[in-house]
Image (spheres, rainbow, N blue to C red):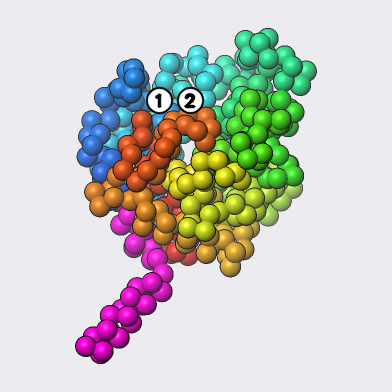
Amino acid sequence: MRKALLSLLCSLGCTAAAQTTAADVLQTARLANDYFMAKYSDPTLPTNVKKIRPSSLWTRAVYYEGLMALYAIDPQQRYIDYTDSWASFHRWTPRNGTATNDADDQCCMQTYIDRYMQSGGQEKIDAAKVNLAQQMRTPNARFAQANAAVMGGTDGLYGWWTWIDAIQMAMPIYFQMARITGDMAYRDHAMSMYTWSRDTLAGGLFNKAGGLWWRDKDYVPPYKEPDGQDCYWSRGNGWVYAALVRCMDQYLTSHATYKPLKKDKAFKQLKKDFIAMSEALLRCQRDDGFWNPSLTSTNYAMKETSGTALFIYGMAWGIRQGWLKDKLYRPAIERAWNAIVRDAIHPDGFIGWMQGTGKDPSAGQPLSYDKVPDFEDYGTGCLLLGAAEYYKLLNK
């Protein structure tokens, strides 16, 4: 009896000490993705949450960002078939057409351009060229007129990203186009829009001292959470963090070495912001591995998967570039990943503790292991982005 007990304790101890492997991460990513692809087997069907929306909306577009990341580590043809069926149905065009300036409409073009870079086909990027060209010459006049006090004296030419989610939805598209065309006007315009949101809108949405972002003009100080802390929405910060990765990755993929980028002003700014965010995020990780919906507040203190997955994505990428210290950030990633696998992933691949759509920590509350969010697609995309980068880190 005593021998059997000792054997059991040894087994439990060995299991607890076991480190996550790349194969483990891939298995979890496949499980979550297979659940999604089975549930939404026809990618052309519109969504129906309170109203009918085409499947090219931002929530689905983020899923395809994650699917492309999964394809990079797990190149199954069915992922491409599923993606191309969706993109072809939408004619490789942003939601609401090429005249849109809404980042939520534009997000789908990230995957269109990815597919162009993988397999060619001018039709995949024609609409993107038209769309970005018209945005680059069009001020956001309606917002500027209605919100003159927060515009910083600008006329709105760069004033389209009025909420931080938009930085992830649209900024990488400009960097992708700069990469494939060699025209740095795309990059320069995107940086002007980014710095307007960062430094000018409502006094600047980025807290340079704290390393975190206020979601939009309605959340800058003196807005406070009930406990007196500033409101830093987890997934909103995750969007910006992911955007920094996705934009800088276009730079790094375009250059044989990092050295030519050291003098590039735009790249240096993005890298500086990425490191500042990384340091801030590391400080507010929960003991259980997750991050709260409100990053520095006790209000809505609970597990939340989408922000956590995006922070895994950024931190793993940062370690791989040599910018984040492995001994500090790898344990944070390991805790976060284990927390998601342990507490959020269901046996069938459904992802729990996922905050629904919204704009602050109160959205979709209360969260739980079993609650189905209003949209499941972007949460799966976030998980796949984080999984793919963690897989690469473990394989390094």
Residue marked by disc 2: 104
Task: Assess whether residue 16 is covered by the magenta stretch.
Answer: yes
Q: What SS does tag 2 mark?
A: helix
Mark 2: amino acid: Asp
Question: Which image quadrant for residue 326?
Answer: bottom right
Q: In the current view of this chain or complex, which residue is farthest to the front?
A: 227
Residue marked by disc 1: 57
Disc 2: CA contacts within 10 A as few (<14), some (14-19) or many (>=20): many
The quadrant of the picture occupied by the N terminus is bottom left
Give whichever of discs 2 and 1 has the lower sequence position.
Answer: 1
Q: In the current view of this chain or complex, which residue is farthest to the right?
A: 153
Task: Assess whether residue 91 is covered by the magenta stretch.
Answer: no
Q: Position of residue 389 (x, y in %)?
A: 46, 53
| Label drawn at residue 312 | none
Q: Identify whether 148 is placed above or below 394.
A: above
Q: What SS does tag 1 mark?
A: loop
Question: Which image quadrant for residue 236?
Answer: top right
Q: Identify whether 285 is placed above or below 238.
A: below
Q: Which residues are the magenta region?
A: 1-30
Real-space Cα separation, disc 2 to disc 1, in angstroms: 7 Å
Q: In terms of secondary structure, what is the magenta stretch mainly? A: helix
Question: Which image quadrant for residue 202?
Answer: top right
Q: Position of residue 162 (x, y in %)?
A: 61, 24
Q: Is residue 186 visible?
A: no
Say whether residue 156 is left or right of residue 132: right
Disc 1: CA contacts within 10 A as few (<14), some (14-19) or many (>=20): some
